[in-house]
Amino acid sequence: MLKKIKVAILEFKEYSKENIYTIDQIKYWLDQQDDLYEYAKLNWNKGSCSGNLPCGHTLNNELSIFIDFHDALKEIVEVHDYEAYFWQELEEYQLIKDNQLKLKDWVKRNERLGSEEFICFFPRYINYSANPYHPKVFVSNFHEFEIYVNRNCFANTIAFIEIFDKLFWEDEILPESIKAIEEEINNLRIIEDDPSDLMK
């Protein structure tokens, strides 16, 4: 089974000579690995020094790494699922960008996505170097090769985030939302050195 895992990862690598993959390639590979993934999930912790708990041997074994590899690719595919929605929102934005009231409604409607769900898209997938271009997929404990997703696959996502960030964070088109976020941050308890402070 370990040989099948190595073969599966090698097959994925061979989809691109430059390690830049499309979402369709990633989806195809994921579809081919269902049985292997289920096997890995059931067996990755067998032989643990800590009984049912993971140990240093099982956390970094081939099955565990394969699970992390699969999950990281699955996650980027799920992020990509919003591309169609962002395309629609960008189309609407072009029609209303000169109308402040409609623009405010547009930002309000997308506030949860822009200020919460996709707030980490750039830090997680784009800001990996001084001059990044293609989104990069990070896999824990996997160092055989790097995985990039063709930037065109996320053209709408990137454009949406850039527009939303400018309107929401820079222009503060929804000042009440910015104020609420600031108040929430200010109200966070500062944990002192003494753990007993948590009980107060």
Image (cartoon, helix red, strand yellow):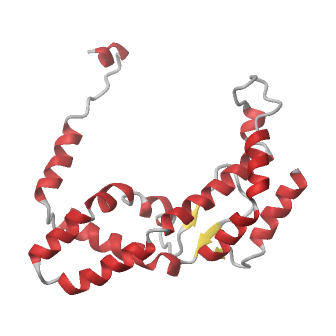
Q: Is residue 93 left or right of residue 125?
A: left
Numbered circles on residues, count:
0
Where is residue 12 drawn, in percent x and y?
75, 69
In the image, is residue 90 above or below residue 59? below
Q: Is residue 102 left or right of residue 151?
A: left
Residue 69 coordinates in the image, percent (x, y) = 68, 56
Instruction: List x then y, in percent, for residue 17.
Output: 74, 79
Residue 171 versus residue 75 in the image, above or below: below
Q: Residue at x 56, y 58 (%)?
A: 75
Among the 4 quarters of the image, the one containing residue 87: bottom left
Q: Residue at x 70, y 54 (%)?
A: 142
Residue at horizontal 81 percent and vertical 63 percent from the top: 8
Q: Residue at x 69, y 26 (%)?
A: 53
* Image quadrant in which the C terminus is located: top left
The x and y percentages for residue 193 are 35, 20
- 70 vs 186, left or right, is right
Left or right for 105, reference 199: left
